[in-house]
Amino acid sequence: MSGENTIIDGLLKNMPKVETLVVAGKVVDATTAGTTATSKALIYDGDGDILLATGLTTPANTTSGYAKGCLFIDTNVATGTTGLYCNKGTNTSCVFTAVTQA
């Protein structure tokens, strides 16, 4: 399999570069999202759980459907306040905590 990397490298070399990637996302209603407003799920895992989402409020604890490690971007926070949260719970009972600088 020594030639495998050469083939992959050759394919990647000829691929066009993408300067910007726009992900429209899937609107998730407030009840399903566990929030007070709709959210947008941007990336799902193979099990159908959300890996990356954005919205005006962070999902309530115990909401299901967010993968462990899911990142949620709260777009309605004050300047100087983190808007990035990580699910430290499970996919059946989320617990989003703020991601802070060390």
Image (tube, rainbow, N blue to C red):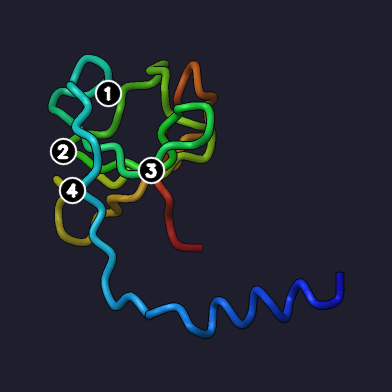
Are there few (<14), some (14-19), or many (20+) residues within 10 Å of tag 2? Answer: some
Name the secondary structure under disc 4: loop
Report the side of 52 relative to 7 (left or right): left
- Could you tell me if the residues under marks 4 and 1 are in contact, i.e. CB atoms within 8 Å? no
Residue 71 placement: quadrant: top left
Crowding near the residue tagged with mark 4, few <14, some 14–19, many ≥20 C-alpha atoms within 10 Å: some
Which is in the foreground here, disc 4 or disc 1?
A: 1
Q: Are marks 2 and 4 in contact (CB under 8 Å)?
A: yes
Q: Residue at x 42, y 22 (%)?
A: 65
Checking the image for residue 43, the label placed there is 3
Identify the mark nearer the N-term, 3 or 4: 3
Residue 76 figure quarter: top left
How much space separates mark 1 and mark 2, taking CA atoms?
11 Å
Element on which disc 1 rests = helix
Q: Is residue 58 left or right of residue 49?
A: left
Q: CA distance from mark 2 to mark 4?
A: 5 Å
- Point out residue 26 in the picture as x, y percentages from the top left corner: 23, 35
What residue sits 42% from the left and 37% below the top?
Answer: 44
Kindly identify the amino acid type of the residue bearing the numbered disc 4: Thr
Q: Nearer the viewer, residue 60 or 91?
A: 91
Closest to the camera, between mark 3 and mark 4, is 3
Which callout, 1 or 2, points at the residue further toward the start of the chain? 1
In the image, which disc is placed on residue 75?
A: 4
Residue 59 located left or right of residue 38: right
Circle 3 crowding by C-alpha within 10 Å: few under 14, some 14–19, many from 20: some
Q: CA distance from mark 3 to mark 2?
A: 17 Å
Q: CA distance from mark 1 to mark 3?
A: 14 Å
Residue with the mark numbered 1: 33
Q: Earlier in the sequence, mark 3 or mark 2?
A: 3
Q: Mark 3 or mark 2: which is in front? A: 3
Residue at 45%, 27% (x, y): give it.
Answer: 48
- The answer to which quarter of the image holds residue 53 is top left
